[in-house]
Amino acid sequence: GASGWVDWNLLLLADGGPNWVKNNVDAPMLTSQDGSALWISPMYFHLAHWAKYVVPGSRVLTVDTSGSELQEVAAFLRPDGRIVVVALCDRLDGHGDPPANQALRIVIGDWEVQLDMLSSSIVTAVLDV
């Protein structure tokens, strides 16, 4: 087994601080100095794909992306028996043009489904297989 943590600032002031390293960074949520305004960034909604659907006790499943241009795909078996697939139709390095729309083909035994993904999107599927 493995364990770990993410040192992530979920909410910072609009200038990107404070944080423990004492540098200014981006965050999923930013607030004004006086607390009167809150900005929610796209990063927040990206994080929600993981936080809402990959529940504690989920196990990572092997994913074969060899027949696809989509390389950022993860799958999990949840304790309730459902399978969660999270796929990113983008390049992680952020360089170059965004990829074209893609189709994600999910095959589990004799069961198959295709998800159409828009360019620069993230898609989560919760499957009752």
Image (cartoon, grey):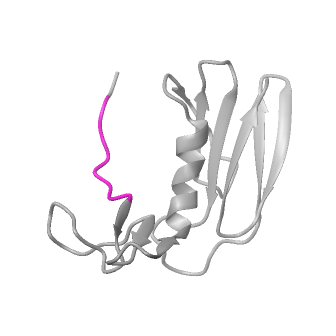
Front-most of 12 and 94?
12
Front-most of 5 and 44?
44
Q: Quadrant of the C terminus?
A: top right
Q: Is residue 58 left or right of residue 24?
A: right
The x and y percentages for residue 35 are: 38, 72
Q: How many marks?
A: 0
The x and y percentages for residue 84 are: 65, 35
> Is residue 68 placed above or below 36 in the rendered structure?
above
The x and y percentages for residue 67 are: 70, 48
Q: Main secondary structure of the magenta part?
A: loop
Residue occupying image coordinates x 59% and y 41%: 52
The x and y percentages for residue 39 are: 50, 73
Q: Is residue 47 left or right of residue 129?
A: left
Residue occupying image coordinates x 68% and y 18%: 81
Q: Quadrant of the N terminus?
A: top left
Front-most of 6 and 129?
6
Give the residues in magenta: 3-10
**Residue 128 image-quadrant placement:** top right
**Residue 50 image-quadrant placement:** top right
Residue occupying image coordinates x 62% and y 76%: 98
85 within the magenta span: no
Q: Is residue 66 left or right of residue 15?
A: right
8 within the magenta span: yes
